[in-house]
Image (cartoon, rainbow, N blue to C red):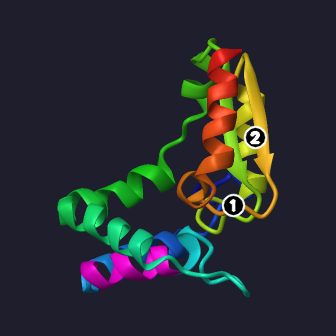
Amino acid sequence: MVKTEKNPGGLPIEVFDGFRAALAANRAQFFLDVPAGPFYGYNRPGAKADQGVIYNWWRQGMMGGAKAHYDGIKAFSETDQTEDLKAISVPTLVMHGDDDQIVPYADSAPLSVKLLKNGILKTYPGFPHGMATTHADVINADLLAFIQS
C-alpha cells in the first residue's frame, strides 16, 4: 500500500506513520476513531453511524496486543504481495468497495485481480472498507454465489 518505485500509486509513508503515531499515543481512541470515520464510511455525508458496530470494532482492537498492532501497520502497508498473488491458481474472488477510504480502490483491487490466474473482481459502488459489516446482505449473497459456482 505504501508508495514506492514499484508502487507509484501507493500512499505516502507519512500516512502509515500517522497511523502508528495515533496508535502509540492513545490506542483506545484510535480504535474508536477509525471505525467511527473512514473504516465504515460513517464520516460520509448522510451516513448513519452504528454505535454497536463501532464499539464492537473497538472491543476487537483492544483484545489484541499493542506491539502486534503497531507492527501490523508496517506489515499491511509495506509488504509486497505481488509474487504471492501470482502463485495463486484457484478461482479467487476479489471484492472491493469503490469508496474504501482505508485501501484505495484504484491502486489495489484492479491491480490485484490482474495478478491472479483465475481472479474475478467484484466492485461495489459506494461501499466502504468495512462493507462485510455495513452491507452484509449483499456481500454474503455474493460470497455464497461465488462458492456455489
Image quadrant in which the N terminus is located: bottom right
> Where does residue 136 sit, x and y in percent of width and height?
59, 50
Q: Where 51 falls versus 144 (above or below)? A: below
In the image shown, does 116 or 80 lie closer to the viewer? 116
Q: Where 114 falls versus 117 (above or below)? A: below
Q: In the picture provided, is 31 more to the left or to the right than 108?
A: left
Q: Which residue is mark 2?
A: 111
Can residue 65 be seen here? The reply is: yes
In the image shown, does 86 or 127 lie closer to the viewer? 127
In the image shown, does 59 or 38 lie closer to the viewer? 59
Q: Residue at x 75, y 40 (%)?
A: 111
> Where does residue 108 sit, x and y in percent of width and height?
69, 48
> Where does residue 140 sit, x and y in percent of width and height?
60, 40
Q: Which residue is mark 1?
A: 104
Magenta segment range?
A: 27-36
Earlier along the polypeptide chain: callout 2 or callout 1? 1
Q: In the picture provided, is 32 more to the left or to the right than 98?
A: left
Q: What amino acid is found at the position of numbered circle 1 in the picture?
A: Pro
Q: Where 119 falls versus 57 (above or below)? A: above
Q: Residue at x 67, y 29 (%)?
A: 93
Rendered image quadrant of residue 121 = top right
Image quadrant in which the C terminus is located: top right
